Image: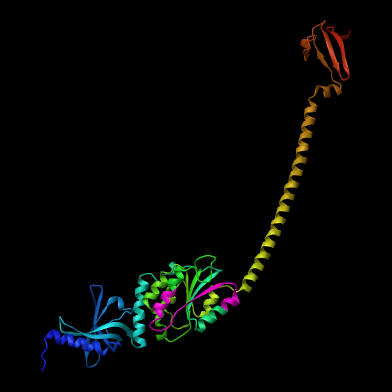
Amino acid sequence: MHILSVSQFVAYLNDTFKAIWDANEAAIEGEVSEFRISQGQWVSFNLKDETALINCFLVLNKLRLPIEDGMRVRLYGTPRVYPKWGKLSFNVERVELVGEGALRKALAALRAKLDAEGLFDPSRKRELPRFPSRIALIASRESAAYGDFVRIVNERWRGLEIDLYHAVVQGEKAPDSVMSALARANTSPGPSSERRGGYDVVVITRGGGSFEELTAFNDERLVRAIYASKIPTLVAIGHERDVTLAEEVADVRGSTPTDCARRLVPDRRDVLFELAQIETSLSEALLRSIKTGRETILRATTGADRWLDTFRMRVASLLRLVSSFNPESVLKRGFALLTAPDGSLITSAAQAKPGLAVSIRLRDGSVGARIDGKQQKLI
């Protein structure tokens, strides 16, 4: 019999575990209990079934789904005995929720968490440009969603530049694949254009599927990446009943790839009709302005003529009034003006002294005279 030390025995067990699962991870399934997070970086919990229990351990950044006691999960990893405590634990590399109920429960918890952080706040959502010219499309090149989107866009508004960023849209690799495509779209000027850099909008789309098949678009890391996108985002996952978190965090959500295309670009026929209406409205407005201007000018001209007529009448009246005070006018009516030798005007009998030589101015000339005292005599 070969006798081993405790350290040797524990090492032998761990070597055996490693040899058994060297090529493949072990996978175990059970119910979570006593879930806890230590020091903000370590996660531990028990996984149990009706007859057994094992302690599980993983690094916090590997936990991509919110889990809690009572959830049924599938764990991928390797068993290990820790020498210091002699305790068997399962080192977890990956966690999957089992059953739609568990998935929905985890999704509700994550949605509440992200909502509390403001990721779904409508006030932060950006509007899409009405006439985008460059589009970054994140989709699977083999998918019907890709073909449907491009076809509808070209039917509605030709000439747009659409650059495809191929991504896996289902399964374990989907979140990382979509995030990688989104990062490239945000930093690249576009592989098929040399005119200018930057896209007007990023579209992420795929066709419908079951709740489980769409779980990639509920991945917290992907949701945060969409939230952080510098370019406005439009996300359309082809499923009306289950709205993913990726759609909720996007600036605009489309229910299907086809609906997404309709939301992104207008129908050129509608735009042409709108332009025709604008042209008609502008023409009518211009004609109204011309008519109003003519009426204004006519009123101004008519008013000026009336003012001039009134002014002429007032001037004529004033001239007649002034003329009535003209001495020449008085003389024409049979009156005469008497002036003394010094040229002063005689206006009273007291000024007419006997023997005073006066000049009498009449309508057509002047004559001399002398004051007699009782009567006037012409000299």
Residue 70 seen in render: no
Q: Residue furthest top?
A: 355
Q: Residue furthest front?
A: 2
Residue 355: % across, % down: 83, 5
Image quadrant in which you'd find residue 226: bottom left
Magenta span covers which residues? 152-181
- Looking at the image, residue 94 sits to the left or right of residue 185; the answer is left
Q: Residue furthest bottom?
A: 1
Residue 294 or residue 136, whichever sits in front? 136
Against 290, residue 94 (above or below) is below
Q: Residue at x 36, y 83 (%)?
A: 104
The mark tally for this picture is 0
Residue 85 or residue 224, whichever sits in front? 85
Residue 277 or residue 12, whichever sits in front? 12
Q: Residue at x 64, y 67 (%)?
A: 275
Quadrant that contains the N terminus = bottom left
Residue 41: % across, % down: 26, 74
Quadrant that contains the C terminus = top right
Q: Residue at x 67, y 68 (%)?
A: 276
Against 201, residue 78 (above or below) is below
Q: How is the image coloured?
A: rainbow
Residue 242: % across, % down: 43, 82
Q: Is residue 162 magenta?
A: yes
Residue 366 seen in render: yes
Q: Residue at x 43, y 77 (%)?
A: 178
